[in-house]
């Protein structure tokens, strides 16, 4: 089935593109979500009227992608992951991990745009991660994976820090000697009541 895309879809095309897709994909996904419209005379005419606006938006996206590429390629991401002596990680790093790290730095990048060699990294080393931006624009980020100490690995024992007493406990402890001192002191004799004889 032929459809006209209403917006950019990774792996399929850009807004305004005419694409031939499987009938089920069009009927069950693209059309109900308004991501595309059927390829009919009516929608083709509407596309003709919107062509200039679409091209303007595309140009803006290209400029934005070029600027984003420059900023991304200046980034270097470091991960410290528990690993064995041979550099094999106890776990792995995937596009979600990279996406979260980029988000911390202020970039909003869809996970599916982040391409990691062989989908996951399972060893220490330096890697290049590809990020698909817009059209044919893409950025390459340097990713450094270092081995961290294994969890539970024996090492020099760290001195145990004495737990700080909560504020309430500290006040109670300070009040205890004062209370004990008060109990130990003899009670002062009461002054005799004055009697005024008239």
Image (cartoon, grey):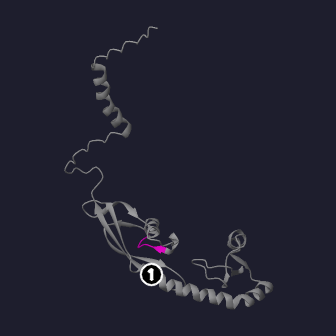
**Horizontal and vertical percent for residue 24?**
70, 71
**Horizontal and vertical percent for residue 126?**
32, 73
Residue at x 31% of width, y 33% of height: 174
Q: Is residue 174 above or below residue 107?
A: above
Q: Is residue 72 left or right of residue 164?
A: right
Residue at x 48% of width, y 81% of height: 68
Q: Is residue 98 above or below residue 56?
A: above
Q: Residue furthest front?
A: 198
**Horizontal and vertical percent for residue 79?**
35, 66
Quadrant of res 179: top left
Quadrant of res 88: bottom left
Examine the structure image and report whether residue 90 is included in the region drawn in magenta.
Answer: no
Question: What residue is shown with label 1?
Answer: 139
Examine the structure image and report whether residue 115 is included in the region drawn in magenta.
Answer: yes
User: Which residues are the magenta region?
Assistant: 114-119
Query: Where's the N terminus, which quadrant?
Result: bottom right
**Horizontal and vertical percent for residue 19?**
66, 83
The front one of 175 and 21 is 175
């Amino acid at each position: 089935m032929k459809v006209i895309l209403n917006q950019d879809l990774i792996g399929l095309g850009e807004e305004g593109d005419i694409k031939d897709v499987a009938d089920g994909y069009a009927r069950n996904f693209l059309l109900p979500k308004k991501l595309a419209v059927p390829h009919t005379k009516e929608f083709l005419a509407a596309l003709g009227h919107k062509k200039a606006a679409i091209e303007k938006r595309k140009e803006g996206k290209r400029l934005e992608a070029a600027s984003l590429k420059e900023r991304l390629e200046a980034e270097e991401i470091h991960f410290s992951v528990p690993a064995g002596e041979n550099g094999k990680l106890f776990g792995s790093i995937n596009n979600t991990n990279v996406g979260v790290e980029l988000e911390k730095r202020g970039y909003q990048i869809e996970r599916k745009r982040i391409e990691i060699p062989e989908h996951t990294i399972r060893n220490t080393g330096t890697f290049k991660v590809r990020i698909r931006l817009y059209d044919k624009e893409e950025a390459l980020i340097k990713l450094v994976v270092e081995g961290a100490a294994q969890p539970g690995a024996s090492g020099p024992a760290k001195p145990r820090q004495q737990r700080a007493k909560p504020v309430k406990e500290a006040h109670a402890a300070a009040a205890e000697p004062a209370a004990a001192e008060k109990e130990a002191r003899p009670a002062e004799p009461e002054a005799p009541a004055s009697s005024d004889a008239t």
